[in-house]
Image (spheres, helix red, strand yellow):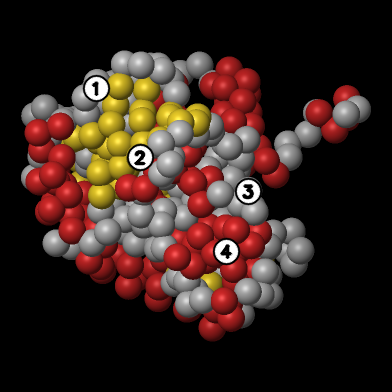
Amino acid sequence: MNKNAQDKVKIIHGAGGRAMDQLISDHILNIFTNKSAGKIGLDELDDGATIDGTEGKTVVLTTDSHLVKPLFFPGGDIGRLAVSGTINDLAVMGAKPLALTSSLIIEEGLKLSELDRILSSMEKTCHEAGVPIITGDTKVMEKNDIDKIVINTAGVGITNVPTTDSGLRPGNKVIVTGTIGDHGMALMQYREGLSFKSKLESDIAPLNNLLELAQDSGEITAMKDPTRGGLAAALNEMATKSNLGITLKEKSIPIKEPVLGISELIGISPYNVANEGKAIVVTNAESANNVVNELQKNELGKDARIIGEITEEWPGKVIMETEVGGRRFLDAPLGDPVPRIC
Ligand code: MG
């Protein structure tokens, strides 16, 4: 590769895998020096950061930009995504989301009917989650300077004790709140014109109420939402940060039949693509079954399962035990194989 090509940002740098980690550490973390306002700052690269509040409370702050293509797809749209994504980042930090901001960057020429449809979807999702949008910003760019619309949402939440993505301990159980790969595969199916194959829909949903249930029903040691880079990227990040191993039982991981079908057809692993309505919840061994039972009572958690456990063996690695009894590493992908996914 010539030097010029290396000197530019590439699509893979935004794909939530190893390439993006490299960009963040070499550039963002390297250049910013003032990086925290509480215990969890920019260096932790968690789903959000904390600010020390009053009376022992911790404020959690997060932000996320959304540029999914197309704007409307089976199971969701950019508006539902923008609200859910930010709420979920607060929820997996163990925080109760209090309010959101909405910053719209719109391309000249976007139909007002489409804008209204997106905003109505944001409003509906806010209602579902019980979290309001309380401030925002609107900018318009010239035609072709941006692709239709980009939405940034920031969110603020509050908690007594934040949950990190690195708090796992040996012997803990790993739970997923539902089926894996739905969002990435639904988008791929739609984009590739394969929608005749199945009625697969994205799983986009705000998870704050579901995860509050989980927190009330057991001792949670870590949480993370497996978005870009999927289950594989999220679990590898958790293993690396905690310097512990994660062993998974492949047959316990819930995956919908159509997701497996599309995966086979396009040659992309369901473990490497984004989920937008699922969380990884790590609990102590004693409370794992109770947490799963409580999650399953909620529609958004009805397919929750224990999929593995935390081990001191293989620090920093994720090991998949296959159905036939073999073992292999589940590596973090270089990047989510599906671009413009969230
Ligand atoms: Mg996240």
Q: Residues within 10 Å of mark 1 (few under 14, many from 20)?
A: many
User: Label 1, label 2: how many angstroms apart (C-alpha)?
Assistant: 18 Å
Q: What secondary structure is found at the residue carrying circle 1?
A: loop
Q: Which residue is mark 1?
A: 169
- Tag 4 and tag 1, C-beta contact below 8 Å: no
Q: Quadrant of residue 122?
A: bottom left
Q: Is residue 141 visible?
A: no
Q: Which mark is residue 262?
A: 4
Q: Residues within 10 Å of mark 3 (few under 14, many from 20)?
A: many
Q: Residues within 10 Å of mark 4 (few under 14, many from 20)?
A: many
> Nearer the N terminus, badge 1 or badge 2?
1
> Nearer the N terminus, badge 3 or badge 2?
2
Q: Residues within 10 Å of mark 2 (few under 14, many from 20)?
A: some
Q: Amino acid at mark 1?
A: Arg
The residue lying toward the viewer, choosing from 92 and 265, is: 265
Q: Is residue 261 above or below residue 15?
A: below
Q: Amino acid at mark 4?
A: Ile
Q: Which mark is residue 337?
A: 3
Percent of width and height locating residue 165 = 33, 31
User: Label 3, label 2: how many angstroms apart (C-alpha)?
Assistant: 24 Å
Q: Which residue is mark 2?
A: 249
Q: Quadrant of residue 164?
A: top left
